[in-house]
């Protein structure tokens, strides 16, 4: 209970009028000690033969800062009588699910020897980085989930490119849909195209991958010439990148729904193989598509924070702001 005692002291020093300690399990002695300092102590289990907290959990992995943030976000999701609040590190509009207006235009991604690929490019004012989306099988540039995600990123100052990795004819061949090498090459091609466009030239590049698209994003990020600054995976299949995971050295955020059990295990295994900083964040109660109320908004907040930390160009020295320190960590 020593850490909790310190937390109670900090809360008191910060001006808290009432401090309640609530824990799933605690020893009788810890409860007594905390009761002397806090206004109330709530413990669901207080075993007489207490030896260690971890003995009372099926999963007692070390949680990252991002995973804790996801749990807190899930606890304060906007409801009919509880409007959303701005999250630290994001604009108010992005946090409340009301992204600011940012012009989007239809584009055609081209490269020698490759079919023309339709895309949607959005470049907000004051842009400080660009994120390319790699959608999953059966999806496209019109994916409502990815378009919502792009709006949140644009509200935070990031340009976004949603594009079709395959032509309509190519998509008819299911083998192409799961050809991670092909999809990764297309993403690399789109990266070169973005870097050649006037409004996005010179900007740091990040990838956002969903489902099988996450495997393609990581495979593409493994290429040294890609120079990708950061990757975010939503309900992704990073395992599809295979042995290339070890070659991914940029910071990677893996976001998985807590109810997406099989994919969660695949992500935990893949996290151990990544060659750079990584964080695995579990969104409580969310399924593979994050259709639950507020789940997708939680992913958006996490993505904005990740890209804000690792992708955004640093502000001028006369406009420096506090940025959370980065640390390589993962759960599992």
Image (spheres, helix red, strand yellow):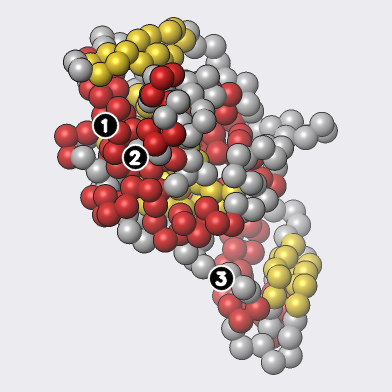
State the CA–CA distance, disc 2 to disc 3.
34 Å
Q: Which residue is mark 2?
A: 180
Q: Dot 3: what SS?
A: loop
For label 1, the crowd category at 10 Å Cα-Cα, with few meaning under 14, some 14 to 19 and many 20 or more, is some
Q: Which residue is mark 3?
A: 60
Work out whether mark 3 precedes mark 1 in sequence or the reverse, and give the earlier one. Answer: 3
Q: Nearer the viewer, residue 28 or 204?
A: 204
Furthest-right residue in this view:
81
- Is residue 88 shown above or below 158? below
Based on the displayed image, in which of its 4 quarters is residue 48 positioned? bottom right
The quadrant in which the N terminus is found is bottom right
Q: Nearer the viewer, residue 218 or 331?
A: 218
Task: Say which residue appears at 69% left-offset and 32% top-offset.
Answer: 84
- Is residue 245 shown above or below 186? below
Residue 265 in the image: state x and y as whole percent: 50, 60
Based on the displayed image, in which of its 4 quarters is residue 297 positioned? top right
For label 3, the crowd category at 10 Å Cα-Cα, with few meaning under 14, some 14 to 19 and many 20 or more, is few
Q: Dot 1: what SS?
A: helix
Q: Is residue 201 visible?
A: no
Task: Say which residue appears at 67% left-offset and 37% top-offset.
Answer: 291
Count of numbered circles in the view? 3
């Amino acid at each position: 209970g020593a850490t909790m005692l310190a937390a109670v002291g900090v809360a008191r020093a910060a001006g808290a009028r009432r401090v309640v300690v609530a824990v799933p399990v605690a020893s009788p002695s810890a409860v007594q000690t905390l009761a002397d300092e806090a206004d109330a102590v709530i413990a669901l289990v207080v075993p007489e033969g207490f030896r260690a907290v971890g003995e009372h959990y099926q999963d007692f992995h070390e949680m990252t800062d991002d995973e804790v943030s996801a749990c807190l976000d899930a606890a304060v999701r906007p409801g009919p009588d509880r409007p959303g609040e701005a999250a630290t590190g994001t604009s108010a509009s992005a946090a409340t699910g009301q992204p600011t207006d940012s012009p989007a235009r239809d584009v055609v991604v081209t490269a020698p020897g490759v079919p023309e690929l339709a895309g949607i490019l959005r470049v907000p004012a004051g842009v400080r980085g660009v994120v390319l989306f790699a959608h999953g099988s059966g999806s496209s540039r019109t994916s409502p989930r990815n378009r919502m995600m792009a709006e949140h990123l644009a509200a935070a100052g990031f340009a976004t490119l949603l594009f079709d990795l395959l032509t309509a004819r190519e998509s008819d061949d299911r083998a192409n849909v799961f050809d991670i090498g092909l999809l990764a090459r297309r993403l690399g091609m789109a990266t070169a195209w973005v870097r050649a466009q006037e409004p996005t030239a010179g900007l740091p590049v990040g990838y956002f991958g969903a489902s099988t698209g996450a495997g393609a994003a990581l495979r593409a990020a493994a290429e040294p010439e890609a120079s990708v600054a950061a990757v975010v995976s939503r309900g992704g299949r990073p395992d599809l990148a295979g042995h290339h995971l070890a070659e991914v050295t940029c910071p990677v955020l893996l976001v998985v729904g807590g109810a997406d059990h099989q994919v969660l295990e695949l992500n935990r295994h893949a996290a151990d193989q990544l060659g750079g900083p990584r964080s695995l964040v579990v969104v409580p109660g969310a399924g593979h598509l994050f259709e639950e109320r507020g789940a997708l908004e939680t992913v958006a907040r996490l993505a904005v924070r990740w890209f804000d930390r690792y992708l955004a160009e640093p502000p001028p020295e006369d406009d420096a702001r506090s940025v959370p320190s980065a640390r390589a960590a993962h759960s599992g």
